[in-house]
Amino acid sequence: MRFSIPSTVLRGIQFGLLIFGAVSSFAGAVIAIAANGGGMPLAYLEGSPFDSYLVPGLVLGLIVGGTQLAGAVGLVLRRNWALLASAVAGFGMLIWIFVEIAMIRQYSVLQTAYFALGGLEIILVLGMLGLVPKLVSGTATEIVRPGPHATD
């Protein structure tokens, strides 16, 4: 049984997730920069290369938020690079969460939520490329079709 969702629906969901990721990254960056962490203790940064939340805030806003926004803009404008930008945004969110946990050595349920956001963005890209339904319902032979010169 194949489960398919129209690409316009996938694109709309992806757009919403990317906008949410961009807005929340920009808000987090403003708080990190303007309020030096917005209540997060500076002790969280001990052992990291940072003595304030300025650089992490800039990375969060410019890189994480910027790639999220770029993916959303690419989808709206239907650019050829939109899915690539969306995948980069999803992986960027995952990397941000991994590095954040490694640096501050603290856990928050928000980290799980944003990790899920990045993962879902990647899954939606795969869905728009037509790969997720094949991976979910297909067999390995349907996913990888050997060429005419295959020996197996």
Image (spheres, grey):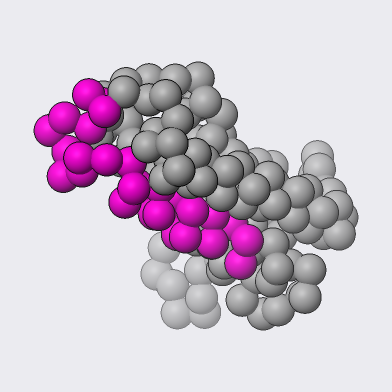
Quadrant of the image containing the N terminus: top right
Task: Name above or below for residue 136 compared with residue 81.
Answer: above
Camera-nearest residue between 1 and 132:
132
User: Which residue lies at the image location 70% right of the left edge and 79% below the top edge?
Assistant: 79
Predominant SS of the magenta segment: helix
User: Which residue lies at the image location 56% right of the left edge and 49% below the top edge?
Assistant: 26
Q: Quadrant of residue 49?
A: top left
Camera-nearest residue between 30 and 139:
30
User: Which residue lies at the image location 26% right of the left edge and 28% below the top edge?
Assistant: 42
Please state the horizontal and vertical placement of residue 92, each as a whole percent of the image. 45, 53
| 126 is within the stretch colored magenta | no
Query: Viewed as shown, does residue 29 lie left or right of 100?
Result: right
- Residues shaded magenta: 42-70
Task: Name above or below for residue 118 compared with residue 75.
Answer: above
Task: Name above or below for residue 146 compared with residue 135.
Answer: below
The answer to whether residue 111 shows anywhere in this view is yes
The answer to whether residue 144 shows anywhere in this view is no
